Image (cartoon, rainbow, N blue to C red):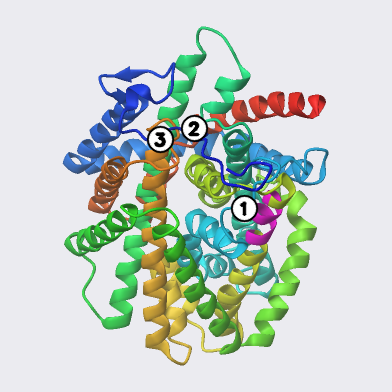
Amino acid sequence: MSNKDGKKSTTNTNPPSDKNPKKQLEGESYIGDFPIVFLVSLVFCSVIAIWGAIRPHQMTSVALSATSFMLQNLDWFFLSMSTFLVALCLYLAFGKYAHIKLGGPDEKPEFSTISWLSMLFSAGMGCGLLFWGVAEPMFHFMSPPTIAAKTSEAARAAMVITNFHWGLHAWGIYAISALILAYFGFRKKKPYLCSTPIKEAFSGKYVEHVCHTTDVIAVLSVVFGVAGSLAMGVLQLSSGLNTSFHIATDSTFFYLGILVFITICFMISASTSLDKGIKILSNLNMSVAGFVLLFVIFAGPARFILEIFVNTLGDYATNIVRMSFHLYPYEGLQDWSSSWTLTYLIWWIAWGPFVGIFIARISKGRTIRQFIIGVLFLPTLFSILWFSAFGGAGFFIEIFGSGGLGELVQEDVTKALFALFDYYPLTLTLKILALFSIFVFLVTSADSATFVIGMMTSHGNLNPSTKHKLTWGLVIAVLSASSLLVGGIEVSKAIAISGAIPFSMILLLQIVAFFRILRTEKESS
């Protein structure tokens, strides 16, 4: 932190290292020498990890039942909540609180804008874009919910639906989750914990218990969310190795081998500091992903793709309000909505504590307006370009080319990206770059997750110990292995979104607490 003269302050405003936990923060609870949140979370996660290793089918059956309940009965709640968060972002970005800085008056951003965007994007959904960049637009083109398949109208609808899933609503959830914690962390100098807003805004004899419960739920949401996503990434890597090098990869043993290698790599990265491991990997990976994106555009039907990009911007802007409240009750398509739109929205909420804390940690020195523009609008714009490129290239093959890509996507979505490259020059090079990018995205996501969970279980320590991070990395790896033992994308999805219901309640409570404190600050200024 800098003082008014611009000199570096020697005062440590962050929670001290967890090497001597009893002296960390007065009023915190411990069991022996360990914070209670660390122990309770570790016990819960370990029990579930062991359950998944011993009886994976039973564990995944429970996860599928829980997610099925959410999708069938709470669709109205999750869509309304996600839309509310986007509206809240717009109010904060352009309202009376827009110029409040996340930090002291003289504090500057810790990371450059490029590094900041690269890290938040890598943690937020980088690997997901590679997984679904071709697959989702093609899937909706082949099976649209309300119109005839394989038509120009189906293509336009497919782009709007896809970007609705990956655009403002997704990043709105992340933005609010992160902004609240960044405000309390850098502005109020409080620990980076999901419970901090509640502790600062409310009082009473039950607040401490609520705060501990909040932090435990947040840890579980992060662990399950990353474990499910890591399992999906392993399946895509396996598919890519099969199509690129004709390696027989369709076996549990091979899946687990890939997972072990990824685990070793993110454990090594996790043992380094934030400005070395995650920052370097994120910048490198965004450079590779950017090159692949430009190659797909300009080595393919460039004019067609750029026209789709402009067209999709207009269609998205025109339809965003209607889709923000559309659940298909009259059309009898609740199952379709649950399988796609609601699954995504619940997924982003489940990932909220992970991505929120990580983005908060790297966002010091930016105003609320700068933060919202960087977290909400720029990633959404990039996502629209990404899907226009990869989905548009797939449309061109189906509409004007030899076809066949759509049927392959419907059979196995993990093969979509690599199948597209078969229609491009330098096919093998593109596949190798894609494999590298997927791998690095998985490593950075898992590395970011271990960092975040280390913070959450050591009273918000901005530099959690390597021991903490490696412990949680091992737990995530075991849970990922459990879903791979059963196999299938649906199982991985179910595990990834299982923490959404409890965290959505926490997020709403955080928002109330945030505005109580924010209003007090504005009135006193």
Residue 490 visible from this viewpoint:
no
- Name the kind of residue labelled 1 in the image: Pro
Q: Earlier in the sequence, mark 1 or mark 3?
A: 1
Q: Residue furthest top?
A: 205
489 falls in the magenta region: no
* CA neighbours of label 2 inside 10 A, class few (<14), some (14 to 19), many (20+): many
Could you give the CA–CA distance between mark 2 and mark 3, rounded to whole angstroms?
10 Å
Give the residue number, with chain letter if any, for mark 3. Answer: 219
Where in the figure is residue 412, as x and y percent of width and height? 39, 67
Give the foreground label among 1 and 2.
Answer: 1
Magenta residues span 371-379
Per the image, label 1 sits on a secondary structure element best described as: loop
Q: Nearer the viewer, mark 2 or mark 3?
A: 2
Give the numbered dot on residue 217.
none
Identify the image quadrant of the N terminus: top right
Q: CA distance from mark 1 to mark 2?
A: 21 Å
In the rendered image, residue 211, in percent from the top left (x then y), is placed at: 48, 21
Distance (Cα) linking label 1 and label 3: 27 Å
- Furthest toward the bottom, the residue is 425
Q: Find residue 223 and report its horizontal and vertical position in percent.
A: 37, 41
| Residue assigned mark 1 | 109
Q: Which residue is mark 2?
A: 193
Residue at the image point whose x is 55% and y is 33% from the top: 504
Q: Amino acid at mark 2?
A: Leu
Which amino acid, by three-letter code, is at mark 3?
A: Val
Mark with earlier residue (2, 3) = 2
Q: Assess disc 1: are there few (<14), some (14-19) or many (≥20) residues with their C-alpha within 10 Å of its C-alpha.
A: some
The dominant secondary structure in magenta is helix
Q: Where 173 falls versus 262 (above or below)?
A: above
Residue shown at 42%/63% (left/top)?
Answer: 441
| Front position in the image: 154 or 169 | 169
